[in-house]
Image: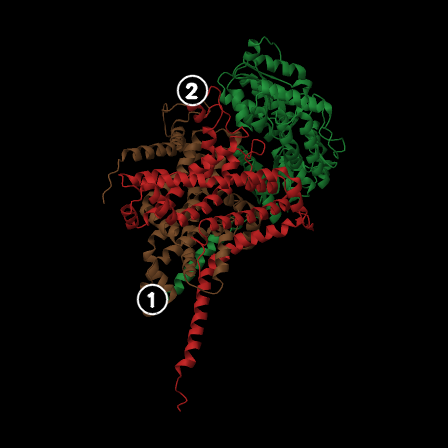
């Protein structure tokens, strides 16, 4: 049944919302190319004399390439570990086994522990493992995340039993069942996990601050301190920096958009 | 009577027993890596905090057991704790606001209009932005002297004096919440959107045939089927906003006074500015219990055991 | 076969990824130095370190710099883990807390062995780094509050010279407050606002630092006067609610008559306020010549494995040669008497206004307040400041606020 909808009110509402969402971005972008001190009043809407030199400043003010590389390595480690560990854990939760309720409760409550309260123990533990100031140490706390475990679980729940049973009859081991049968059907869960773990790992600031000492192990967000350090004078360079840090996340989202949206589906409606 | 004759009834229980133990072991081994990470970085730290909350300790000095003294101080002697608790509850209570807005957006984007992909992307853009960056830009937008919002308000002659948003005891917290909602809106919307898209269309058609108008269809079909999404949204939203340390710290640093102090920033300041790790640990424990309680209540309200926990 | 090779390469890769970077570097003696928010002086420090390394072959220097809010978190984590940096640059009163907790090395024996070194520094600033009769820090760079005043606004209000008493301060503020313009604001972090109290003879604690001394009728009256002035716009509200950017920004916009802040503000404000020149901006002492210092000093960690070497590095960085360079480049005072003289001379020619500002930092160093050696300084601030804020913002009357503050401060003092 085709419903006659007047679409322009919807478009209008959405456009207004998009405007609200984009205005802060516009300002970040504008200041990054014009450097108009954002403490001047009244604010200019159109930048005067835009130039890209703040981006150059950022590149030279901090060892941008090195920090970027560090962030990339840590994020890739995190993403790979996340997908593997969360898929395995998610699969386990689709099976019934003794102690399942306890595990579920445990997972839920682990979400309730704020990072700020774990800084010192996390540091000490990482130190005991000998992983301070290393890529592995930086990535380790984020190797598995509970939200994504549940996303995988829901995605696996949606795989028809018939397929799994057929695979069992064919004599496949559990590991192969996950790899050959379930993962291909859970592409969206994988995409979701990739995007979310990337965003969380890429933007992580507090843990790299505490866990690294040498200059060349620092990740990108730590470079932020350089731009709002002495005298807190926020300038175009700070905003250019924010845009440069933001770009990979958005790029990744655009690439994996379709799958990502579907991925959160199955996480939401299973009951 | 052949000795080698195998009796099915005798062997099958053993076979399945061995098989099910093997399966249990296998499943636990799949869970093990994740459990290990959580043990190291969540559970052990929580344990550290619990132990510490019953002690008096400062770095380089041995710990002294003091029983419930920290808790007693927190509950009877600490105005800041109650303010921070109140603010935290306020933030939790405001999570539904963001979710309702996201619900509206999801409904709009879900309708058959052109360019919904574009709308969806634009609305999600705020999520990958570093929270510190979000805090900086919104701090500017709310600035009393040079902020964009005051500029707009005064240009439209809605007020003749600039409004001190972040310096006002009444406006500061709502402003922080607004910035948080802005950041999370796209994320909520996508969760709800995908929930919407799995509701079978024929349910709506059947309801329409029965004469239900769009509002009733929304109330009777959409909302109930969205309960799991909404619960998930609420839990994630609550956890995110309540632990949005960077946002509060950079935007207002808990000020003015302690008007925007939340438990997480208070814990951090106690631990690292005042070197009171022991007291901060006690507050952490209370905070943890609070979140558990709220999640349990939310779970009940959304129909019990949906989304995350499964009936066996 | 394949799987095994994969496993081996995987483990090898994991091994490299896991080896802490600083262990990979080979060195005989390693000194680590943590500085507070001074990353902009990278070039200068590199030179200093090179010279030190040449004089001490085989020494590696690891330089860490952290932003103000992050440094305590970083440092304390390192402390708990037992890997605190050898040399630390500390701002404000945090050093007292760490000294009281036994994290810092008592430098008195080093001072006694080297009286010539000690003589290089301004004795008042030196003595502000003493706790429990022990010396803990060597001055790195120092500043204290002064009164900036907007000469244009003064002229408009018919005022010719900066206020000489607290009453004049309030009166002048009121005279200049019109419409969007306000008369006075102050920075309020650490104890930078305390000169206002001290010029009215109000003390925070008793001389033995054991009991609060501020809950007096005089203090309550003062708070009520401040509240009244704030409500009428004579004192800008930002004085009590702002951090760094808001108050300095407000003064830089040219709409505030006077600002009490330390020397660093001058450079921030000058960057934003195009109206600033010697004819429009004045620098003076606050009434009564009272000021609160906000100093940076170098301390040595007790857990340092090379304390002599660490102290040698401190001496090197605060020597006349390098202190002069710092004073000249960063336009700060170092409390190193000769370095400051040289630094001031170089500023005099370029920027007479900066010279006037920096000159105030050397005057009346015997009238510094707000720099008590309190081991739980942060907690006392937390107990006192919110109530003070409540009073001056009119949320509570002075008497009640002070009584509440006294209770809170008592609790903190009892705990220690």
Task: Looking at the picture, tell me which residue is in the foreground, B218 or A225.
Answer: B218
Q: Which chain, by letter, is red? A: B
Q: Position of residue A57 (x, y in %)?
A: 42, 32
Q: Is residue B60 left or right of residue B95?
A: right
Q: Which mark is residue B157?
A: 2
* Extreme-bottom residue of the structure: B1
B226 or C256, which lies in front? B226
Above or below for A10 versus C148: below
Tell me which chain appears brown.
A
Q: Chain of mark 1?
A: A
Q: Residues within 10 Å of mark 2 (few under 14, many from 20)?
A: few
Residue ranking furthest to the top: C158
Give coordinates of residue A175: x percent, y percent: 38, 64
Residue for badge 1: A165
Give the image location of residue C51, x and y in percent. Answer: 57, 36
Farthest residue in the right direction?
C208
Whether labels 2 and 1 share one chain:
no
Front residue (pair C156, A166): A166
Q: Identify the image quadrant of the C terminus of chain A.
A: bottom left
| C293 or B209, nearer to the observer | B209
Rendered location of residue A2, percent (x, y): 23, 43
Say which chain tag 2 marks.
B
Indicate whether B138 appears above or below C99.
above
The letter of the green chain is: C
Figure coloring: by chain
Q: Residues within 10 Å of mark 1 (few under 14, many from 20)?
A: few
Q: CA distance from mark 2 to mark 1?
A: 69 Å
Assign the N terminus of chain A to one quadrant of the image.
top left
């Amino acid at each position: 049944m085709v419903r006659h909808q007047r679409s322009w009110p919807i478009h209008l509402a959405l456009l207004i919302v998009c405007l609200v969402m984009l205005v802060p971005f516009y300002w970040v972008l504008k200041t990054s190319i014009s450097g108009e001190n954002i403490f001047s009043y009244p604010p200019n809407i159109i930048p005067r004399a835009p130039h890209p030199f703040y981006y150059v400043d950022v590149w030279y003010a901090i060892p941008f390439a090195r920090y970027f590389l560090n962030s990339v390595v840590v994020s890739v480690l995190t993403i790979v570990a996340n997908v593997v560990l969360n898929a395995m854990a998610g699969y386990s939760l689709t099976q019934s086994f003794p102690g399942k309720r306890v595990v579920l409760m445990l997972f839920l409550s682990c979400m309730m522990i704020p990072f700020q309260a774990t800084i010192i123990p996390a540091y000490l533990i990482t130190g005991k493992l000998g992983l301070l100031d290393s890529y592995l140490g930086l990535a380790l706390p984020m190797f598995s995340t509970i939200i994504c475990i549940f996303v995988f679980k829901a995605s696996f729940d949606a795989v028809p039993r018939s397929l799994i049973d057929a695979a069992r009859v064919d004599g496949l081991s559990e590991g192969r069942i996950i790899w050959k049968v379930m993962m291909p059907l859970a592409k969206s869960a994988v995409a979701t996990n990739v995007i979310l773990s990337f965003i969380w790992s890429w933007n992580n600031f507090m843990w790299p601050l505490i866990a690294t000492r040498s200059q060349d192990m620092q990740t990108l967000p730590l470079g932020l301190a350089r731009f709002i350090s002495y005298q807190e004078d926020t300038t175009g360079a700070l905003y250019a920096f924010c845009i440069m840090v933001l770009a990979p996340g958005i790029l990744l989202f655009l690439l994996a958009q379709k799958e990502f949206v579907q991925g959160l589906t199955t996480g939401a409606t299973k009951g | 009577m052949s000795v080698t004759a195998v009796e099915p009834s005798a062997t099958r229980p053993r076979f399945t027993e061995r098989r099910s133990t093997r399966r249990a072991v296998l499943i636990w081994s799949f869970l093990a890596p994740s459990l290990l990470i959580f043990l190291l970085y969540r559970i052990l730290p929580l344990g550290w905090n619990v132990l510490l909350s019953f002690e008096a300790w400062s770095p380089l000095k041995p710990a002294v057991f003091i029983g419930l003294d920290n808790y007693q101080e927190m509950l009877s002697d600490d105005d800041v704790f109650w303010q921070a608790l109140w603010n935290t509850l306020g933030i939790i209570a405001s999570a539904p606001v963001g979710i309702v807005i996201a619900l509206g957006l999801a409904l709009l984007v879900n309708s058959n209009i052109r360019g919904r992909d574009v709308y969806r992307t634009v609305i999600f853009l705020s999520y990958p932005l570093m929270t510190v960056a979000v805090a900086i830009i919104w701090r500017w937008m709310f600035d009393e002297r040079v902020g964009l919002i005051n500029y707009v308000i005064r240009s439209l002659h809605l007020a003749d004096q600039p409004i001190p948003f972040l310096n006002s005891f009444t406006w500061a917290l709502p402003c922080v919440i607004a910035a948080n909602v802005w950041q999370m809106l796209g994320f909520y919307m996508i969760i709800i959107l995908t929930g919407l898209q799995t509701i079978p269309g024929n349910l709506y058609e059947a309801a329409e045939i029965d004469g239900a108008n769009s509002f009733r269809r929304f109330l009777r079909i959409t909302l109930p089927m969205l309960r799991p999404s909404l619960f998930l949204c609420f839990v994630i939203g609550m956890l995110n906003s309540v632990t949005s340390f960077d946002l509060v710290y950079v935007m207002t640093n808990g000020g003015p006074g302690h008007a925007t102090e939340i438990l997480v920033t208070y814990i951090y300041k106690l631990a690292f500015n005042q070197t009171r790790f022991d007291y901060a640990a006690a507050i952490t424990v209370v905070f943890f219990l609070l979140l558990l309680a709220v999640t349990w209540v939310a779970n009940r309200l959304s129909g019990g055991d949906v989304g995350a926990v499964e009936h066996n | 076969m394949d799987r095994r090779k994969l496993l081996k390469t995987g483990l090898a890769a994991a091994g490299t990824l896991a080896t802490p970077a600083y262990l990979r570097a080979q060195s005989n003696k390693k000194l680590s130095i943590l500085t507070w928010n001074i990353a902009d002086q990278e070039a200068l420090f590199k030179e200093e370190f090179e010279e030190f390394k040449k004089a001490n072959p085989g020494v590696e220097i690891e330089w860490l710099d952290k932003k103000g809010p992050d440094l305590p978190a970083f440092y304390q984590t390192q402390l708990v883990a037992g890997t605190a940096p050898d040399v630390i640059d500390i701002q404000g009163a945090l050093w007292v807390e760490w000294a009281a907790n036994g994290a810092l090395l008592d430098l008195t024996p080093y001072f006694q062995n080297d009286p010539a070194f000690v003589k290089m520094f301004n004795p008042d600033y030196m003595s502000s780094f003493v706790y429990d009769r022990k010396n803990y820090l060597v001055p790195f760079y120092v500043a204290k509050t002064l009164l900036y005043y907007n000469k244009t606004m003064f002229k408009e209000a018919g005022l010719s010279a900066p206020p000489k008493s607290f009453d004049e301060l309030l009166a002048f503020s009121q005279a200049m407050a019109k419409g969007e313009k306000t008369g006075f604001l102050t920075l309020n972090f650490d104890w930078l606002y305390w000169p206002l109290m001290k010029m009215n003879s109000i003390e925070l604690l008793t001389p033995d630092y054991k009991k609060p001394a501020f809950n007096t009728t005089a203090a309550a009256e003062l708070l009520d006067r401040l509240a009244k002035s704030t409500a009428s716009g004579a004192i800008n509200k930002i004085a009590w609610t702002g951090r760094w950017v808001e108050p300095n920004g407000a003064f830089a916009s040219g709409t505030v008559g006077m600002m009490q802040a330390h020397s660093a503000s001058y450079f921030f404000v000058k960057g934003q306020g195009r109206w600033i020149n010697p004819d429009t901006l004045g620098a003076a002492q606050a009434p009564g010549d009272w000021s609160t210092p906000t100093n940076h000093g170098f301390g040595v960690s007790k857990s340092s494995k090379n304390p002599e070497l660490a102290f040698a590095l401190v001496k090197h960085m605060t020597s006349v040669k390098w202190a002069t360079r710092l004073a000249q480049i960063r336009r700060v005072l170092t409390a190193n008497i000769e370095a400051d003289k040289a630094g001031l001379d170089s500023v005099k020619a370029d920027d007479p206004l900066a010279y006037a500002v920096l000159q105030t930092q050397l005057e009346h160093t015997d009238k510094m307040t707000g720099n008590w050696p309190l081991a739980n300084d942060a907690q006392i601030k937390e107990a006192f400041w919110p109530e003070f804020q409540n009073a001056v913002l009119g949320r509570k009357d002075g008497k009640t606020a002070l009584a509440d503050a006294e209770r809170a401060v008592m609790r903190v003092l009892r705990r220690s």
